[in-house]
Amino acid sequence: MSRHRVIFDVTITHLTSRLKQSSIAALGVTFGIGTFITLMSFMTGLNELLDGLILNRTPHVRIYNEITPSDEQPVALSEAFEDAVNLIHSVKPKGSQERVHNALPMMARLADDPRVLGIAPQVKAPVFYLAGNIELNGIVSGIQPFDEKRLFNFGDYVTEGTPDDLAKNRNGILLGAGVATKMSLELGDRIQLSTARGVLVPLKVVGIFQSGLAEVDNIQSYVNISMAQQMLGEGTAYITDIQVKLHDIENAVPMAEEIRRNFKASAVDIKAANAQFETGTSIRNLITYAVSITLLIVAGFGIYNILNMLIYEKMNDIAILKATGFSGDDVRNIFIGQAMVIGIVGGLLGLLIGLVMSIMINQTPFETEALPTIKTFPVNFDWRFYLFGIVFALVSTFLAGYLPARKARKIDPVEIIRGQ
């Protein structure tokens, strides 16, 4: 029988002779890894849900025309006042439309950029919703439904009807859920919109939209972009917003700067538009990882304590092993082997428990009016959590076994036997 086989048999014998302690050590690993996977899967799933509510509907770069006061006033152009100190009061914004200038050539050039995944133009218009004696302020966005659905998961927020229904019906409207509730409107009903110029536009309700943000759903609705342009009395070149979706979100900041420099247009990137939200996401992720790793560390200390006590209980066995020819390295390998067996068994069971708990959470009903498309709790089944869990289990149990194994290696069998 080979030396390694003998060491393995002694390792298994030690584990089975103290089966209760060995089981407790393995359960420490199991519940540590299982809790880590469950917590990480659930918390990151929730974070992705919250991020999706904002980021999935936010373009990586938004191009628009910001109306601001002119930096150069007419008096500055006069030679008579060239050397004077000019104090100007009540400066008014310069005369300019809300449209993006040269929108169509700009979109064509951006579409050829390899960094760009897609472009979705919009036409926004303030309106009044009219139904009988009810009159509500609102905003209508003219969109291309297929582009919005492809780039921004628009269909996930349509609770009744579909974006395709809007694309097929030029005189249709997707009403915000808050507007529909206040005006008691359902699919197939008629509604009139009044523009700022007093133009009345009759439309048919082909869908209900709910973003999960009440302040949006109470005013926002969507129509075809051609209808929005017609409501404003403008042509097909009239675009108020250009939404750009990129392959890599990290390119948003430099691209926004390029657009401002090359096209002389206002452009805001997603990080600037959602700076506070990203800060909250970072803090939530930090707390999640801190708590999860703490659980693993606690499990590692538990294993160390159990193996340390096991060595003291096995002093006589260690002395006998050394007296019968086992070297200090052999004794050390025996106890490291015990730790690794505990780590492997406990780690695999932990992966299984983590997976089962995650599936159970993912099947638990979760329904709220704010999130109509969510039916169960969100869970992130990321394989990296399972890989990290089993690697940590093996590393922590190795270290927990190595430290007390070094003590066992240095035990003098003569002193132990003489003490008996």
Image: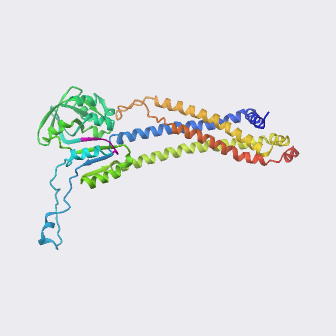
Q: Is residue 340 left or right of residue 272?
A: right
Furthest residue to the bottom?
A: 83
Can residue 313 be seen? yes
For the point 71% across and 38% down, the residue is 338
Q: Nearer the viewer, residue 118 or 354?
A: 118
Q: Which percent across, then down, holds residue 304?
A: 67, 44
Query: Which quadrant would residue 217 be assigned to in this image?
Result: top left
- Tell me the quarter of the image containing the C terminus: top right
Does the magenta run of residues contain 120?
yes
Boundaries of the magenta span? 114-121
Q: Which percent across, then down, holds residue 118?
A: 31, 40
Furthest residue to the right?
A: 418
Q: Which percent across, then down, holds residue 1?
A: 80, 33
For the point 16% across and 56% down, the residue is 94
The secondary structure that most of the magenta stretch takes on is: strand
Q: Nearer the viewer, residue 110 or 47?
A: 110
Can residue 25 be seen? no
Q: Is residue 212 left or right of residue 389?
A: left
Q: Nearer the viewer, residue 322 or 5?
A: 5
Q: Is residue 92 above or below residue 24?
A: below
For the point 16% across and 65% down, the residue is 88
Q: Which percent across, then down, holds residue 103?
A: 21, 46
Q: Is residue 24 left or right of residue 204?
A: right
Furthest residue to the top?
A: 188
